[in-house]
Amino acid sequence: MEVTFLRHGKTDLNGKGYIATKKDYPLNEIGKEQCLNNVFPFNSFNCVYCSPYKRTIETAKIVYPYLEPVIFPNLTQRDLGNLNEKLKKDYSSAYLKAVREYIINPKNAETLQDIIERLDLFIEYIKLHHDDNSRLLVVTHNGIMRIVKKIYMKENNNIDSENLGQFKMILRK
């Protein structure tokens, strides 16, 4: 089965300097334009999944308007606990890097293991509900995509968040 991961388009929250937030922003005009520039052809996918955030749902509906996306809560971004709603400028870059790489886990934040467990559940779900010939689109968040690449694909390169960074993963039952 071929799974294409796609990062959501830009929102007005991007560039505001937050480390993380639970605020649910829709796409802004730049984000909508990013999506319109990345529409997939009809019959590219058998199913579309996304997180429950407005920005992922909108992205999914614009880049692949032929199927209604299935909302899957396991695809949400990492909950950074006490760092939610905090600004990057108030913390050192070394600290933020350690948080992003799961070396330091802020109070009440999800651990890497927490996220792997919920992604494992998602992967088991799609293996159970789709055959090896399926082509799936998963619209999610940058952090989730980094984990998929690092843990499941054993790759360590970054996601291009300026251009709806996308990549494919092959799964077998």
Image: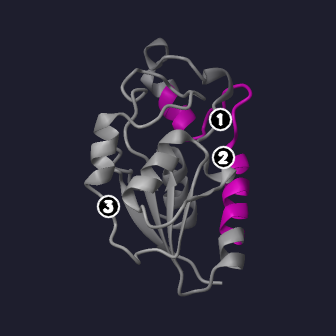
Residue 9 at x, y = what percent? 38, 44
Give SS at disc 3: loop
Q: Nearer the viewer, mark 2 or mark 3?
A: 3
Q: Which residue is mark 2?
A: 112
* Relative depth, front residue between 80 and 129: 129
Q: Nearer the viewer, mark 1 or mark 2?
A: 1
> Distance between the Cα atoms at labels 1 and 2?
11 Å
* Residue 57 falls inside the magenta stretch: no
Tell me the number on the disc at residue 79. 1
Image quadrant containing the C terminus: bottom right
Q: In the rendered structure, which disc, 3 or 1, sits on the residue that comes first in sequence?
A: 3
Tell me the number on the disc at residue 42. none
Q: Is residue 43 above or below residue 56?
A: below
Kind of residue at badge 1? Asp
- Label 1 CA crowd tier, 10 Å (few <14, some 14–19, many 20+): some
The residues colored magenta run 96-124
* Relative depth, front residue between 107 and 68: 68
